[in-house]
Amino acid sequence: MYTADRPSLGWIAGQGSWTAHFSDTALEQIAELVGPLFDVSTRNILPDGGAQNPVFLIAEGWGYSYYDFPDGRRHVVDVHPPGEIIGVAAACSRHNAPRVSTLTQVTAARLDGAVLRKRQDTSDDMARGLSRLLAAQQADLIDQMGSLARHTAYERVAAFLLRLYERLEKGAPTGRGVFACPVSQQVMGDLLGLSVVHVNRSLRRLAEDGILHKRASDVEILDARALRRLAVG
């Protein structure tokens, strides 16, 4: 893994843990491809700028990626804290990229996935970095799929919140049991395959059992050991 601390990287040097998968040379190439920062208000969709497979870098704020089914139901792929990169897998595979909407006001930048894919074909540094990033994302997805397959609603909510906490700690460790989580119950349900009623009931039970307390924009872990036992199932 590498660190990104060169001035030429600009604000990208302060991005989250995904940058650790890339060499400085590859990060400099990404910095060259990324467009200017732009702001998007809460509950709005990030503009694709005409790119078929846009890749977004979240500088500030929280978003989530999703696909809509023809019957109006929504599948949320993931939630995205500040410092994350979104859409790389779709860009590299030429599949349709998920749409990205905001949970809070977001400051983001965009690059064209087709251009990133071409750079992958011509740069060994870029190819290695993308391979590492996609492998890490696949491992996270496998964990999430395992939770959906084997866990009850109560356990799914617990496992999701634990995974989110661990992601945030990996990017900016605090060692505290309180972490930001401006994720609505609707978005959480669309991610976990649950109704809002099941999400609400599970959060209430987690609070009653003294495991965690979810407020409007954060979560306080009350019993980390019990939370981990639930998440493991």
Image (spheres, rainbow, N blue to C red):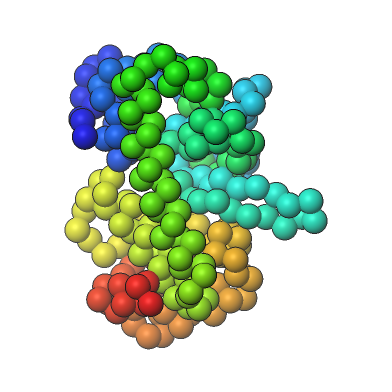
Is residue 176 depicted above or below 233 in this figure?
above
Which quadrant is the N terminus positioned in? top left
Q: Is residue 200 visible?
A: no
Give 66 or 232, whichever is nearer the viewer.
Answer: 232
Q: Is residue 125 left or right of residue 121?
A: left
Q: Is residue 117 left or right of residue 233?
A: right
Is residue 13 depicted above or below 191 in this figure?
above
Q: Residue at x 25, y 21 (%)?
A: 24
Is residue 69 depicted above or below 202 in this figure?
above
Question: Hey, which quadrant is residue 213 in on the image?
Answer: bottom left
Residue 33 placement (x, y as % from top left): 45, 16
Question: Hey, which quadrant is residue 14 in on the image?
Answer: top left
Q: Residue at x 30, y 62 (%)?
A: 178
Q: Is residue 110 left or right of residue 209?
A: right
Question: Hey, which quadrant is residue 52 in on the image?
Answer: top right
Q: Residue at x 25, y 76 (%)?
A: 225
Which quadrant is the C terminus positioned in? bottom left
Give 170 or 145, whichever is nearer the viewer.
Answer: 145
Residue 157 placement (x, y as % from top left): 47, 70
